[in-house]
């Protein structure tokens, strides 16, 4: 998916988690519900949503962070990364899952960032190339939709709307949507 798709979907996911923070705390997660937590979740999520493409110097974020992305590209090549657009370690879900867990345990301000990166990998898994797991030992591929296609945009919208709907319903009293549905359903 392109940078815009990742940005939009990561924003929906991180905002969805932010409006449901109390629900996660009720489930037993040890997170402080402060305005700073909410801001860091959303801002970190947006940044994380585009960060994995830093391993591709030709992507939007790769262009923005040129010296770093070129260096990552060179190091990747040394370790067997083929071509500029071939996905490498920054697209490995194990690395980002470990980042999420470590952030939760030791440095919660980074939680939003890793939520964003994982949302990026989720969308990329629908590309024909999929995403590499454990330095490319396996590959997760959930679809065959090219990044720059109309299908990629449609898929991103579908997932984004789904995340927004589920988040508002889970958050309960947001706009009274859940209350309204409860009256209809029961
Ligand atoms: Zn990517």
Image: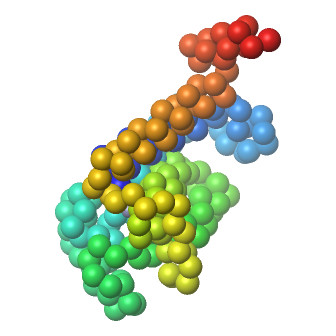
Q: Residue at x 34, y 60 (%)?
A: 146
Quadrant holding the N terminus: bottom left
Q: Quadrant of residue 93?
A: bottom right
Residue 185: give x, y in percent of width and height: 74, 14
Q: Residue at x 25, y 62 (%)?
A: 59
Question: Where, by quadrant of the figure, is residue 128 drawn?
Answer: bottom left
Quadrant of the rendered image holding ligand 1: bottom left
Q: Looking at the image, which residue is at 58% across and 70% down?
A: 94
Compared across the picture, whether 158 is left or right of 174 comes to left
What colour scheme governs how the chains and residues are painted in the rendered image of this protein? rainbow
- How far across and how far down the image is residue 85, in percent? 29, 73
- Residue 104 image-quadrant placement: bottom right
Depth check, front residue: 100 or 146: 146
148 vs 132, left or right, is left
> From the viewer's perspective, is residue 88 above or below residue 141?
below
**Which residue is at the front of the view, 37 or 76?**
76
* Residue 31 appears anywhere in the view: yes
The reply to whether residue 113 is visible in this rendering is: no
- The quarter of the picture where the C terminus appears is top right
Is residue 160 placed above or below 65 in the rendered structure? above
- Judge from the rendering whether residue 69 lies leftward or rightward of residue 43; answer left or right: left
Q: Position of residue 20 (x, y in %)?
A: 63, 32
Foreground: 148 or 36? 148
Left or right: where does residue 100 sit relative to residue 36? right
């Amino acid at each position: 998916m392109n940078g815009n798709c990742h940005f939009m979907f990561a924003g929906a996911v991180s905002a969805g988690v932010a409006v449901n923070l109390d629900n996660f705390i009720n489930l037993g997660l040890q997170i402080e519900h402060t305005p700073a937590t909410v801001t860091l979740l959303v801002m970190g999520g947006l940044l994380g949503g585009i960060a994995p493409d830093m391993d591709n110097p030709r992507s939007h974020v790769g262009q923005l962070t040129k010296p770093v992305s070129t260096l990552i590209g060179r190091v990747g090549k040394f370790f067997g990364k083929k071509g500029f657009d071939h996905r490498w370690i920054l697209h490995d879900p194990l690395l980002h899952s470990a980042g999420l867990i470590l952030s939760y345990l030791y440095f919660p301000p980074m939680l939003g960032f890793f939520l964003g990166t994982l949302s990026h990998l989720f969308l990329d898994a629908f590309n024909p190339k999929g995403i590499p797991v454990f330095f490319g030992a396996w590959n997760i591929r959930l679809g065959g939709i090219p990044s720059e296609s109309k299908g990629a945009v449609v898929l991103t919208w579908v997932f984004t709307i789904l995340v927004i709907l589920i988040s508002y319903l889970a958050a309960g009293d947001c706009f009274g949507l859940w209350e309204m549905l409860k009256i209809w359903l029961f």
